[in-house]
Image (tube, rainbow, N blue to C red):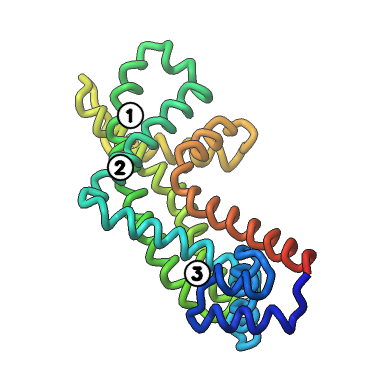
């Protein structure tokens, strides 16, 4: 195993623009080991200067890499916005059918089954509209988070995605309220917006009074809000991986 006296000059030569292959051969270490020590050297420097904890540094590195991949993909696809909207449109329709078939399958066997078939279109469109907007909000938040200097500020920025997920819950109710009204206009006796409002107010009150009885509605809401949970899931995954990466590096010293 190389000593600190050997690692430091090797890393310094690499940082000064030296060739990784030649340096690793010169000091008798694998190229991957040299690059790993360079990353650890930079992370340690940032920590010493009060910038980032090593875990946050690893997390930022992963998030920055993901952001670069997104920017590269967007730059190479001029129709990226349309592709993104269609993706969320199909995802919302898929979530709609997953929720309906698993929570309210009896509705598809009744006389109103065609109503639930038609309502998927406005539900998918309005859901995709929200998800597309929240996607770009998330990208903006990530860019701001990567510029932060403290762990608290960094985590605080990314936690805004949780707020977006909460807002999405209210949006799901709005989507079904307005979608049902739109489809109802094609029926012989369409509901007014006031009637639709009273219907959904009643559902909300019932769920609040007896959550156990409204588990199907809660489950359906979670399924419909799946797309807005994707950024939060990515943050949780990256933060967890960063912790384990840090622990592994410390234990291998």
Q: Which residue does the image show at 53% across and 53% down from the upper left? A: 234
Q: Give above or below for 243 relative to 28.
A: above
Label 1 SS: helix
Circle 3 residues within 10 Å: few <14, some 14–19, many ≥20: some
Mark 2 vs mark 3, CA separation in Å = 26 Å
Of callouts 3 and 1, the N-terminal one: 1
Label 2 SS: helix
Give the residue number, with chain letter if any, for mark 1.
120
Q: How far across and down, in percent of the image, does residue 252 sit? A: 78, 64
Question: Residue 57 shows which numbered tag?
Answer: none
Of callouts 2 and 3, the N-terminal one: 2
- Please tell me which residue lies in front, 139 or 8: 8
Q: Quadrant of residue 201?
A: top left
Give the residue number, with chain letter if any, for mark 2.
126
Of callouts 1 and 2, the N-terminal one: 1
Give the residue number, with chain letter if any, for mark 3.
157
Do the residues under discs 1 and 2 have CB atoms within 8 angstroms? Answer: no
- Please tell me which residue lies in front, 236 or 43: 43
Q: Give above or below for 216 relative to 82.
A: above
Q: How far across and down, in percent of the image, does residue 230 sit? A: 49, 48
Q: Which residue does the image show at 65% across and 86% down from the upper left? A: 48
* Quarter occupied by the N terminus: bottom right
């Amino acid at each position: 195993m190389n000593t600190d006296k050997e690692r430091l000059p090797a890393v310094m030569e690499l940082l000064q623009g030296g060739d990784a292959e030649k340096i690793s051969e010169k000091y008798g270490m694998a190229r991957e080991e040299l690059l790993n020590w360079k990353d650890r050297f930079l992370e340690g420097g940032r920590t010493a200067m009060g910038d980032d904890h090593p875990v946050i540094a690893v997390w930022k590195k992963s998030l920055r890499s993901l952001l670069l991949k997104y920017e590269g993909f967007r730059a190479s696809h001029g129709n990226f916005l349309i592709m993104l909207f269609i993706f969320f449109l199909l995802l919302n329709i898929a979530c709609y059918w997953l929720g309906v078939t698993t929570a309210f399958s009896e509705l598809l066997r009744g006389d109103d089954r065609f109503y639930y078939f038609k309502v998927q279109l406005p539900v998918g469109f309005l859901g995709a509209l929200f998800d597309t907007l929240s996607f770009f909000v998330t990208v903006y938040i990530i860019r701001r988070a990567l510029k932060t200097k403290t762990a608290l500020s960094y985590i605080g920025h990314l936690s805004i995605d949780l707020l977006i997920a909460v807002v999405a819950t209210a949006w799901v109710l709005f989507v079904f309220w307005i979608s049902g009204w739109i489809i109802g206009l094609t029926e012989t006796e369409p509901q007014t917006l006031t009637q639709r409002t009273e219907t959904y107010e009643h559902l909300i009150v019932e769920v609040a009074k007896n959550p156990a009885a409204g588990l199907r509605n809660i489950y359906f809401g979670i399924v419909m809000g799946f797309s807005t949970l994707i950024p939060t899931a990515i943050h949780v995954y990256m933060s967890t991986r960063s912790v384990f990466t840090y622990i592994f590096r410390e234990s291998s010293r």
